[in-house]
Image (cartoon, rainbow, N blue to C red):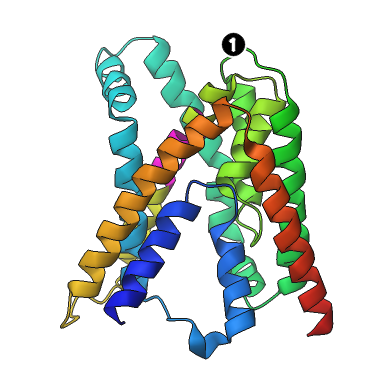
Amino acid sequence: METIDAIILGVIQGLTEFLPVSSSGHLELGKAILGNESVPEESLLFTVVLHFATALSTIVIFRKDIFQIIKGLLQFKKNDETMFSIRIIVSMIPAVLVGLFFEEQLEQLFDGNILLVGFMLIITAILLWLADKAKDTNKIVTAPNAFIIGIAQAIAMLPGISRSGATISTSVLLGNDKTKAARFSFLMVIPLIFGKIGKDLLSGDLNFSTENNTPLILGFIAAFISGLFACTWMISLVKKSKLSYFALYCIIVGVVAIIFGFIK
């Protein structure tokens, strides 16, 4: 992999991991428009490195929250931190089940299905627009809410559905505080990312014998820095009710994808 390709992919991963525009959908569109040969193929190792970078950027942004959660858990008693951790675990259940039992079916959807991407982007746009119009509240995420948000996260495995967009919008539409919704959305994905990394490491499919580690390092740095920016920006946008801009963007890209899909 070329150095410039690694940096570009790192920036894309860092931005789209947090901004509600669907990284998987954009990758499929890029493959369809440019052709598979024109899009640099990401090795499994490179993918793991980029996801590790975005997970670390989330940890840095929410370091105080994570420290408080760990501190509360070490008290080994029922407190706010323990209950929050339980809600995080509850939110993971749908995505874990889908990943375990429907992995092959999901992979088949990532094969240039542009019509699907287009329609899913429009669904993402609708969710973002509805969430943007929702009233501000002080409500925190409850356990039943966490499970429903988890279902949204599992559905976001489809190309074109934004994970952050789906989870934050679902949380807000359930009546939760917008800032708390964004916080929960970003924290709930950390265990899943590290779980996926662990699964890939244990699978033995990762190739650590690469001769040139420069692209890996630069891709990691690019994903980490862009992830810090995107995560902070997204929290601010949700708080200020600015998701409609991304809704408009997703509608435009979705319509273009649908037209392109029919023409193709």
* Camera-nearest residue between 84 and 128: 128
Q: x, y percentage for residue 170?
A: 67, 34
Q: Is residue 199 magenta?
A: no
Most extreme residue toward the bottom is 37
Who's the residue at 59% across and 11% down the image? 138
**Residue 208 vertical position relative to residue 24 in the rendered view, above or below:** below
Q: Is residue 36 visible?
A: yes
Q: Residue at x 60, y 13 (%)?
A: 139
> Residue 221 in the image: x percent, y percent?
25, 58
Q: x and y percent of residue 12 in the render? A: 44, 61
Q: What kind of residue is marked 1? A: Asn
- Residue 90 visible to the viewer: no
* 37 is higher (above) or lower (below) than 138: below
Query: Residue 187 lies in magenta, yes or no?
Result: yes
Question: Which region is colored magenta?
Answer: 184-192
**The N terminus, quarter of image:** bottom left
Expressed as whole percent of the image width and height from the top left, the position of residue 204 reads 29, 71
- Local packing at callout 1 (Cα closer than 10 Å; few below 14, some 14-19, many 20+) is few
Quarter of the image for residue 211 reads bottom left
Which residue is under mark 1?
Answer: 138
Prevailing SS of the magenta stretch: helix
Q: Which residue appears at 50% of the width and 38% of the height?
A: 234
Local SS, label 1: loop
Q: Is residue 182 above or below residue 92?
A: above
At x 70% / y 24%, what residue is drawn? Answer: 174
